[in-house]
Image: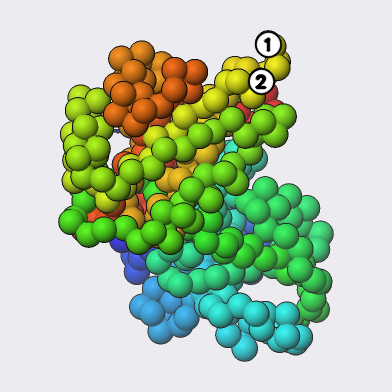
Amino acid sequence: MKVISRRGDLLLRHMEDTVEDYEMMHRWLNKSHVLAAYSYHPSSIEEVMEKYKKRIKGENHVIPSFILYKGKEIGYIQFYPVTDEYGLRDKQILNRYHKPFAADIFIGEEDMQGKGLAPETLMMLQDYLFSEKDCDAVLIDPDIDNLRGLRAYEKAGFRRLTEFTRSGSDRMTVLMINERKNDMKGLIFKRRSIRKYIDKPIEKEKIERIVRAAQLAPSAMAVFPWEIVVTTDREKMKKVADVSPYGKFAKDAGAVFIMCGDLSHYKEGRGKDFWVQDCSAAIENILLQIVEEGLGGVWLGVYPIEERCNDLRKIFNIPEDIIPLGTIVCGYSDEENVAKDRFFPEKVHYEEY
Ligand SMILES: Cc1cc2nc3c(=O)[nH]c(=O)nc-3n(C[C@H](O)[C@H](O)[C@H](O)COP(=O)(O)O)c2cc1C
C-alpha cells in the first residue's frame, strides 16, 4: 500500500492496478448518490480499468487515490496539477498562482456520508500538496446544484472564485479555491521544541525582531502587562540552566528570554488574572518568530513555581512585584523545525460539546 498521507483515522493511499480497486471504483461510480455529483457512469469494470489504469501507471497527470477510514476504503479522491486541459477559459484568474492543483472527491459508501469526512480528507490532501508538492492553491469545481459538496468544501476552507462551464461541457460549475496561507501558517505547522544548540551567536537584529513579535500578541483590555528580560551572556545562561531540572540545555543557548508580568498595570481587581494569558500569547509569538529567524527554541515553565520565580529574580535583578512566567531558550541548531502533524479530531466539538 502506497500511503500519501494520514491523519487520525483517515488515510489516503494510491489507487492500485488490482481487480479489487477497479471493482470498488466500478461499484461506487454506479451508486446514485455518487452519480448525482460525479456524473461519470462506466458500464463495465473493463471501462473503469481502461480509464484509471493510465492514471495509476503515471501516464496521465491525474493521481487517483482511495480514502480509507479506520482501515476501510470509503471513497475516492484524485488530484492533478492544473494545466490548460483544465478548461478554464479565463486563464487570468489563476495567474497569481505558481503551482495550482485541482481535486475531485466523492465518498462512495453511503453510510460514511455526512460525517465530515470529505472536508477532513480535503484538508489532509491540501496540507500534503502545500508541504510536499510546492503547491500554492487547490481548486475544486462542484456542479452548481451540488449543495452538499459546496457546503463540505466551504467547511474545508474553500471559497468561491467564479462560476464557469468547461470548454467542451455544458455543466455549470462553481470554481472554488483554497490558497496556501501566508508564512504564518507554515511557522505554526513547523514549530516544535528544539533543545540542542550549536555554538553560534544570534544576531542583534534577530533578537530585536523576536521581542517585537512578542509585543504584537493580543492582550486583554490592551494592558500589555509583559516585561521581557533578554540575555546572551553565557554565565547568566548557565545559571538559568540550573533553575529548572528540565532546562539544562539552556547553558548552550544563543539567547534566553524571560517573559514576566507586571501586575501593577491592573486597577484593583479588574482583569488581573488575564496577565498569564497575555504573557503566554507573547511567549507563543516569540516561539514562532524564533522559527521565522531560522532558530530553534523551547518554553521552560517557571510560574507558578515560587522557587523558580525567585531564582530568576536573583539572576536578573527582577523586582519582587514582577512575576517571571516562563523562560524561552533559543539558539542556532542542527535540528530542524520540521513539519509535523498533531491533530486530535475528538478534541474538537462543533456546535456542542
Ligand atoms: C508551560 C510550559 C512549560 C514547559 N516546560 C518545559 C521544560 O521545563 N523543559 C522542556 O524541555 N520543555 C518544556 N516545555 C515544552 C514541552 O515539553 C513541549 O511543548 C511539548 O512536549 C510538545 O512538544 P512540541 O513543543 O515540540 O510541540 C514546556 C511547555 C510549556 C507550554
Q: Is residue 221 visible?
A: yes
* On screen, residue 92 above or below 210: below
Could you tell me which secondary element the residue under label 2 belongs to? loop
Residue at image location 51% in from the left, 34% down from the top = 227
What percent of the width, then of the height, locates residue 245?
20, 24
Residue at image location 26% in from the left, 58% down from the top = 201
Split into quadrants, the picture shows ligand 1 in the one at: top left
Which residue is label 1 attached to? 269
The C terminus sits in image quarter: top right
Q: Nearest the camera: 64 or 192?
A: 192
Q: Nearest the camera: 316 or 275?
A: 316
Asked if residue 16 lies left or right of residue 240, the reply is right
Asked if the residues shown at circle 2 and circle 1 are in contact, with their CB atoms under 8 angstroms apart, the answer is: yes
Q: Amino acid at mark 2?
A: Tyr
Residue at image location 31% in from the left, 58% down from the top = 202
Local crowd at mark 1 within 10 Å, few (<14), some, or many (≥20)?
few
Q: Nearest the camera: 73 or 14?
A: 14
